[in-house]
Image (tube, grey):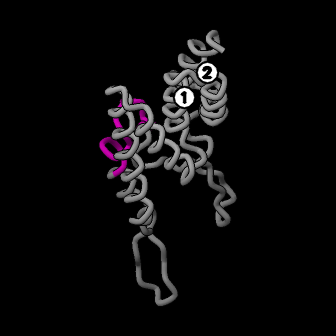
């Protein structure tokens, strides 16, 4: 169930434990099918331990950096924009958006799959398959990349 989050494993120096970091736009690990931010995120933040400062006053552990949140929201919006352009047959414009996302986030398997799809739709099957394969290296269970690879590999 947590295969999509393998790249988000973190090691705690204090406890020596490995923890799974779930992004706010990732599927919720509870299995509901909802995004984490719409499901269990608030409950999990409420359960974060308190940290004692040097002055013995209690402070709450900080939530994710707002810059990272806005950057991931921007990426999600760009992904939606690119997929909408693809649906309209505007593959060149969609390709440009997918390439920009890939340049800023080398582990974005959705952008790699979308870019591969744009390449395939313009007849660049071999290059497209490389991007589907890259997406599957990051997330082997990503159905869209698996389907596209199967479809377009036969067109090489």
Q: Mark 1 points at which residue?
A: 119
Task: Mark 2: give few (<14), some (14-19) or many (20+) Cα within 10 Å.
Answer: many
Furthest toward the bottom, the residue is 55
Residue 151 drawn at (x, y percent):
56, 12
The image quarter in which residue 66 lies:
bottom left
Nearer-N-terminus badge (1/2): 1
Residue 72 lies within the magenta run: no
Residue ID at (66%, 57%): 11
**Residue at horizontal 59 percent and vertical 24 percent from the top:** 124
Q: Position of residue 83 (x, y in %)?
A: 38, 33
Residue 31 or residue 153, whichever sits in front: 153
Q: Circle 1 — which element? A: helix
Residue 82, image x and y in percent?
A: 39, 38
Instruction: Say if 151 sits above or below 105 in the image.
Output: above
Asked if the residue at tag 2 contacts the one at tag 1, i.e. Cβ–Cβ closer than 8 Å, the answer is yes
Q: Which residue does the numbered mark 2 point to in the structure image?
A: 125
Residue 154, quarter of the rendered image: top right
Residue 33 drawn in magenta: yes
The foreground one among 112 and 41 is 112
91 to the left or right of 6: left
Which residue is more in the foreground, 147 or 131?
131
Badge 1, how many Cα within 10 Å: few under 14, some, many 20+?
Answer: many
Residue drawn at the location 34% of the way across and 40% of the way down: 81
State the predominant SS element of the stretch in magenta.
loop
Which residues fall within the magenta stretch?
27-41
Image height check: is 152 above or below 122? above
Q: On the rendered image, what quadrant is the C terminus found in?
A: top right
């Amino acid at each position: 169930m947590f295969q999509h989050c393998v790249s988000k494993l973190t090691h705690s120096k204090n406890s020596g434990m490995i923890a799974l970091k779930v992004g706010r736009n990732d599927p919720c690990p509870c299995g509901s099918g909802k995004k984490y931010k719409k499901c269990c995120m608030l409950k999990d933040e409420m359960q974060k331990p308190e940290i004692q400062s040097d002055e013995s006053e209690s402070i709450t552990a900080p939530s994710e950096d707002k810059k990272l949140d806005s950057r991931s929201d921007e990426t999600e919006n760009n992904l939606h924009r690119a997929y909408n352009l693809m649906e309209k047959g505007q593959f060149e414009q969609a390709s440009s958006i997918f390439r920009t996302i890939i340049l800023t986030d080398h582990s974005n398997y959705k952008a790699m799959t979308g870019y591969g799809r744009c390449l395939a739709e313009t007849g660049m099957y071999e290059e497209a398959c490389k991007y589907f394969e890259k997406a599957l290296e990051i997330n082997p269970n990503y159905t869209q990349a698996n389907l596209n690879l199967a479809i377009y590999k036969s067109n090489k």
